[in-house]
Amino acid sequence: MRSPRPFLDELAAGAGMLAFAVILLEFVLSGRFRTVSRKIGMDATMRFHQLVARTAVVLAFIHPFLYRIQLNPIYPKGRTGQFSLTTDFASIGTGILAWLLLPVFVALAISRNHSAYSYETWRLTHGIGALLIAGFVFHHTMSAGRYSDDPVLAVVWIVLFAIALLSLIYIYLIEPLRQKKRPWRVRSVSPVALKTWELTLEPDGHEGLAYEAGQFVWLNVGNNSFSAHENPFSISSAPALGRHLQFTIKELGDFTKTIGNIKPGTQAFIDGPHGNLRLSGRIEPGIALIAGGIGVAPLLGILRELHATGDKRPTTLIYANRVEDQIVHREELSVLAHEHGTKIVHVLSDPPMSSASEFKIGDIAAGETWVGETGLVDTDLLKRLFAAPETKNWLFMLCGPSQMMENVEVALIDMGVAPRQILSERFTYD
């Protein structure tokens, strides 16, 4: 039986153990496990992932400061007769390393979007860093703590650490092996707007992917299936139109800068589908799609699916861009407006002032007389478009810049739209 000790010492041990449990939980909250994200949504999964990580930092930070400082402490013996606390650096050194690395690790994750490193480099270092920290804490917990000799608790830590380790093995080994058996080939790469391309894949020797319009995959083009060079992209094609997959991709950096150079026949691999921006089970009487920039990609897939399946519900697409040249598939959107009855509302924050466009598709040229909305997708615009009382019961699906989506969500809720009727998909998190 262990001798009693002060409350703060016990609180310190509890904070340390809770921080370790939280760190291990993060491995299954990475967004790569559909069984997790499907139930609560990808946005909620990633937000929870962030919150949990920051909680771990706080718990780990306070852990050593809660212990009392004793000049000549008498260490208690555990159940095995061995000392259950130690100042041996081999035991506490790994804890110190983890304590120093964890806040740096989380800070780098928060600042990822402002980093000079590529997404692929960040992803690889993020995985390695997480494993190192978990390994250091595991060693520290098993060798330096008051409760390290408890056999039941030891089994708990071993099982949790094994789950975390297996999750990495699944992501970096098992999933690539599965992808290798189901390769894809690039059918075509076509420009669809200014610095924006449509990449079309077709299955190579298999039946394709079972997905729903609006979902996304991690896409790897031109590399082997074990490569870290993969990025998340929304599927802009409709399942009802065939086995091929289409992605509407804007040149923003890293892989996307070279999208126009990809040759037909190039091998590709995908991990998915992921995401909860989908229509299954939704019975709302109307659908409002609100897109900002390249956020139109999944919503385009949803529109295509609604048209292909003959869904007769009234549909409105609000599509915001900076300039007219950035409008993707303008011709097709006009066809959808005519054939499906979708109301298309274009919004430009920087409408054309004069002359011709830099980009032209088909017979449609931008830069002429602009007749759409101007400014931002704000409360005034939403109130004008959804003034009818029945539209408050519609389903609202959002994808675009985070700030735009947050503003739209707040405006819709203020208008009386229930939060359960608002679906969004984010690929950037603070």
Image (cartoon, rainbow, N blue to C red):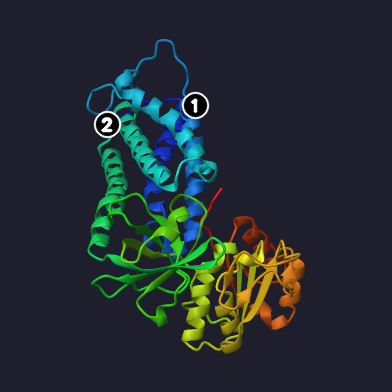
Which of the image's four quarters has the N terminus? top left
Residue at point 50%, 89% (across, down): 310
| Amino acid type shown at disc 2 | Asp
Vertical order, 359 against 26 (above or below): below
Secondary structure of the residue carrying tag 2 is: loop
Query: Looking at the picture, which amino acid does disc 1 mark?
Result: Leu
Q: Where does label 1 land, which residue?
A: 66
For marks 1 and 2, give the CA distance: 21 Å
Closer-to-camera residue (242/420): 242
Q: Is residue 304 left or right of residue 323?
A: left
Horizontal side of residue 208 vs 190, given as left or right: left
Judge from the rendering whether residue 275 lies leftward or rightward of residue 135; answer left or right. Answer: right
Residue 307's x, y, as percent?
Answer: 51, 85
x and y percent of residue 19 in the render? 43, 38
For the residue pair 404 and 222, the one nearer the viewer reads as 222
Q: Which mark is residue 332?
A: none
In the figure, residue 188 lies in which quadrant?
A: bottom left
Residue in the image at 32% along x and 26% along y: 144
Of labels 1 and 2, earlier in sequence is: 1
x, y percent for residue 398: 58, 67
10 Å crowding of disc 1: few (<14), some (14-19), many (20+) = some
Whether residue 164 is visible here, answered yes or no, is yes
Q: Is residue 98 above or below residue 42?
A: above
Q: Is residue 399 left or right of residue 30?
A: right
Residue situated furthest top in the rendering: 72
Residue count near mark 2 (Cα–Cα under 10 Å), binned few <14, some 14–19, many ≥20: many
Residue 239 place in picture, x, y as percent = 40, 78
Q: Which residue is mark 2?
A: 149
